[in-house]
Each structure stands twice: as structure tokens, then as C-alpha cells.
Image: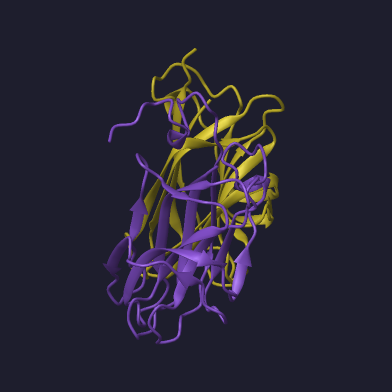
Chain colours: A yellow, B purple
Amino acid sequence: MPNHSYALGGRTVATAATANHVAAQLWNPSTTIPIWVRQLWVCSTTAGVSNLAVNRSNARGATPTATVTPDIDSDLEKYVTPTTATVLELATFGTQPTLDAPAMFRWNLPAVIGAGFIFVWDPPIKVPPASGLCLYTPTAVILPASDITFVWDE
Amino acid sequence: MRRHRSDPAFGRAGTIARHRYSAGGRTAATTATTGNAIATLWNPSTTKPIWLISYQYVTIDAVNSGRHSYQRITTRGTPGSTITPDIDNDWEKYAAPASGALIDLAAFSVQPTLATPFTARWHVPTGTGEMPVFFYPIRPVKIPPGTGFAATNPQASIAGAGDVTFEWME
């Protein structure tokens, strides 16, 4: 049975200078269907150092500054809206998502506009129902406003 | 040597399912001493090997990023900090590592015992966000029980602090 691949992007605002504050969260609200994350793109939009970590979240948090809701256009085959109703939530959060530990990935970027990287995961990272995958600052340093893209299958 | 896809070292599409893990953390700078370890992936199991898929290191400042070498270790040493992966570090979120594999980070008060010669060597320029990334996707590096794999400083100069991620299968 073919999977559907989705891509979804947005721009965060800067986080607070607080360790473990989330910049972006791909949240799977389904109670039954997992998703598999294949890529994460990050690109700085201001000249500030980015301390980065990637990890799972087990509680969603609340009141992100922005939520990007994918639709049929986000399907690389333009076939169907995501059945899981997965969303991309962007900093800042009024209530932070609850992160698992330890981090799955650590990285940092220099203080240059346009500094970035693309994580490509093969095999993809499974995100079970009612959980998420987050990009966050693991240090008490502002994570600057960034352009974020997630690519996932479901 | 070509390997058949059923070889367990492939870890996917083979006949034996394997789990993929990753874990990351931040090292402190090493001392300016030849052979000091920057970060290690240690397999404490007495029976189970693990297979290293990739090692990533990213400098966090423009101080002494320096030279790096990569080699096996035969004793663990005493690290500055240790990361203990759990079920969340499984890409399928299925099980904590059965091997008990650990990430140890500089600075080590007792250095691991290094096996020579190097398996690889690299030079990281002085700058923030400089990185070597090593992938072994086709032929992962087998780490037998009771051994490990280290990024080390091959010269008597400081290896600067960095963000480190190991990926492995078991």
C-alpha cells in the first residue's frame, strides 16, 4: 500500500533564552496512526548563533505563535489531506511541549543569515500517535528566527 | 566485498530486523594532549555487537577546532559526561538499546585506551559551525562487545567543544 509523503514549512520567531524551549514541533494528534519523518530543514533568517537539538515530545504544549495546517497541496502527490491531521507548530509556545531525553541529535549553526542544514533520515523516524518531533535550543541561548521544513510519510 | 541485502549489517530490507538509534550531546574542549578523546560510543554489552552508522561533530566556537582522528577503543575511560539513550532514541520508539550503549563526552579524566592505527583522520577549520560528518551506511563499523569507537585529538593541541551525534544499529 503506498504511503503519502507530505512537506510543510514555516518561519519561527526567536525563542526565549531558556534551555529546552521549542522552535518548531511536528505534532501527530492521531490516536491510532503513526507518521514517519524523513527530513528536517533549518535555515537561519538572522545573524544569531543557533544551538540546536532534535527530540521527541510526549505532550503537545499550547499556544504556539503560529500553526501550519497541511492540506491536499502538501501531499507530494496532491492526493489527500493528511489522515493523521499532523500540524507544524512554531515558536514561541505559551506552554512548552514536554520533551523526552536525551536528545536524538545535536547541532549548531554560525551567526550567519542563511546558515542551515538538512537532516535526511533513512530509515525515517517513527512518531507514534499523540506525540511529536521537536527542534529546540538545548542551551539557555536564543534560537533565532528560522525557516523550518518537515517532510514525513503516513 | 559485496553483501547480500539479507546481511544483518544492512539493518533494513534484510531478513533480520534491527533497531536504529541516535543520541547527541555537547563536549567540553580537550586538553592539549595527544590522544585525548573528544567523544566515544561505548558498547558495554558482554555479548551483543553494535554497528556504527554515522558520527557528526559541529564546532560551537572559533577556538581550537583543530584536528580529529577516529579509532577504536578497548577500555572506556572516565568521561566528563555520559548520555544514556533510552526508548526515545530508537527511531521506531520500540525499545531501549539492548546493548546498553553509551555516549561519553570530553573532557575525560581517565582516557580510553586507543587502538591504533587511526581508521580515519580529518582537519576541522577554526570557525563556528564547522563540521565533519562521517557516514558508514553501506558497511557500518562493527563495534564488538566491551569495546568502543572514539573521536580523538591526534596532536598536542586542544580540540574545541562541539555538538556530537552518534547513530548506530543493534
Image height of A34 relative to B168, above or below = above
Q: Is residue A85 visible?
A: yes
Looking at the image, which residue is at 69% across and 56% down? Answer: A94
Image height of B155 relative to B17, above or below = below
Q: Position of residue B170 (x, y in %)?
A: 55, 42
Q: Camera-side residue: B100 or A29?
A: B100
Q: Is residue A151 visible?
A: no
Q: Position of residue A107 (x, y in %)?
A: 45, 61
Looking at the image, which residue is at 50% across and 65% down? Answer: B74
Q: Camera-side residue: B50 or B168?
A: B50
Quadrant (top left, top right, bottom left, bottom right) of the N terminus of chain B: top left
Residue lying farthest to the top in this orientation: A1
Q: Camera-side residue: B79 or B77?
A: B77
Q: Camera-side residue: A17 or B137?
A: B137
Q: In which quarter of the image is residue B91?
A: top right
Image height of B107 relative to B84, above or below = below
Image height of B169 relative to B32, above or below = above
Looking at the image, which residue is at 29% across and 71% down? Answer: B124
How many numbered discs sit on the rendered protein?
0
- From the viewer's perspective, is A74 left or right of A96? left
Q: Position of residue A24 (x, y in %)?
A: 54, 50
Looking at the image, which residue is at 39% across and 25% down? Answer: A76
Q: Where is residue A100 in the image (x, y as percent from the top left)?
A: 67, 52
